[in-house]
């Protein structure tokens, strides 16, 4: 099965804007809630408490919570596309089957990494092959994770190139979101280059000093805070839109996949 017809990307984007404008809960506020919650979890994960074993447990727990919150954000966007009311608590709807969400994510990441170990291109293709696996699970939590993956393989057949082009149209937003980080890192690189230019070897103490140094008179901690806030603010204006457009592609591919499966096997998948 393949998606023969090219999906009208502009129409999908226009439809997403209209749907988001009618959302009862502001997509900007929901995006901010999700990203702030994820950022808080990340900050907690950076704080080492107790032994190394407990720190590993803490990191794994935070990773699982972050994955489940991300699924909740997708559920919010799915509700918008269906014209349903999605409250702030929708962000936590994934916790009722969190273990499936986490296991599916780990399995798909493992497949992508394994394909990527062969070469870059197979890993890149695998990334798009499993793109809709999570969406399948969120639509029907009763299915198995491997069934969700198999469905995604059928749905993305012939669609990977279009999904890649869709992602390219949001690259500008992604670059804008990390702009302060890029400026800071470039300034640090210039300072580190000045060390190399004056020393015949790398002095780790000097490197540490410059990595945590002020840039343009702004302390390193302030730069980190700026990067976080800037990234959240920029994401508020495009993440929900991107997610809704991606779901539009999923809905189109799902319909074509189901029809092709029925033609081949005489029943719905």
Image (cartoon, rainbow, N blue to C red):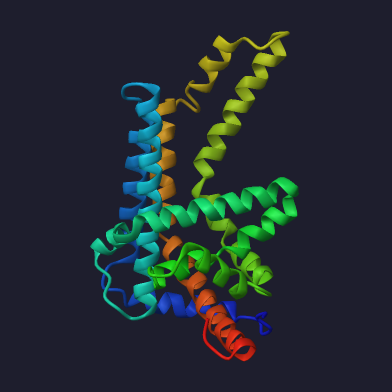
Identify the residue shown where x is 69% and y is 15%. Answer: 196
Numbered label tally: 0
Front-most of 182 and 69?
69
Q: Position of residue 269 (x, y in %)?
A: 53, 81
Identify the residue shown where x is 49% and y is 79%. Answer: 14
Q: Position of residue 140 (x, y in %)?
A: 40, 72
90 relative position to 116: left or right: left
Identify the residue shown where x is 62% and y is 27%. Answer: 189
Identify the residue shown where x is 24% and y is 62%. Answer: 89
182 relative position to 38: left or right: right
Q: Quadrant of the N terminus?
A: bottom right
157 relative position to 236: left or right: right
Q: Position of residue 127 (x, y in %)?
A: 62, 58
Q: Position of residue 53 (x, y in %)?
A: 39, 26
Q: Quadrant of residue 226?
A: top left
Q: Quadrant of residue 90?
A: bottom left
Asked if residue 21 is positioned above or below residue 98 in the image, the reply reads below
Q: Is residue 223 visible?
A: yes
12 relative position to 7: left or right: left
Front-most of 76 and 116?
116
Q: Quadrant of residue 28?
A: bottom left
Asked if residue 211 is positioned above or below residue 178 in the image, the reply reads above
Q: Is residue 168 visible?
A: no
């Amino acid at each position: 099965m393949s998606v023969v017809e090219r999906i009208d990307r502009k129409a999908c984007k226009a439809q997403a804007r209209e749907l988001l404008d009618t959302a009862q809960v502001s997509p900007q506020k929901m995006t901010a809630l999700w990203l702030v919650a994820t950022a808080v979890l990340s900050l907690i994960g950076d704080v080492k408490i107790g032994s190394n074993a407990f720190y590993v447990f803490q990191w794994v727990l935070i990773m699982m919570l972050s994955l489940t919150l991300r699924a909740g954000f997708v559920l919010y966007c799915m509700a918008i596309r269906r014209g349903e009311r999605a409250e702030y608590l929708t962000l936590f709807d994934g916790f009722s089957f969190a273990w499936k969400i986490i296991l599916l994510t780990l399995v798909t990441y493992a497949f992508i990494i394994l394909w990527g170990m062969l070469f870059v291109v197979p890993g890149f293709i695998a990334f798009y092959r499993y793109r809709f696996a999570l969406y399948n699970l969120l639509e029907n939590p009763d299915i198995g994770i491997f069934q969700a993956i198999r469905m995604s393989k059928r749905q993305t057949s012939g669609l990977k190139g279009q999904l890649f082009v869709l992602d390219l149209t949001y690259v500008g937003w992604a670059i804008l979101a990390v702009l302060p980080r890029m400026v800071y890192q470039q300034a640090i690189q210039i300072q580190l280059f000045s060390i190399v230019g004056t020393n015949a070897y790398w002095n780790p103490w000097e490197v540490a000093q410059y990595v945590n140094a002020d840039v343009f008179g702004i302390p390193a901690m302030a730069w980190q805070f700026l990067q976080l806030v800037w990234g959240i603010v920029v994401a508020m204006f495009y993440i929900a839109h991107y997610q809704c457009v991606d779901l539009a592609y999923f809905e189109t591919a799902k319909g074509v996949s189901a029809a092709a499966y029925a033609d081949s096997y005489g029943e719905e998948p």
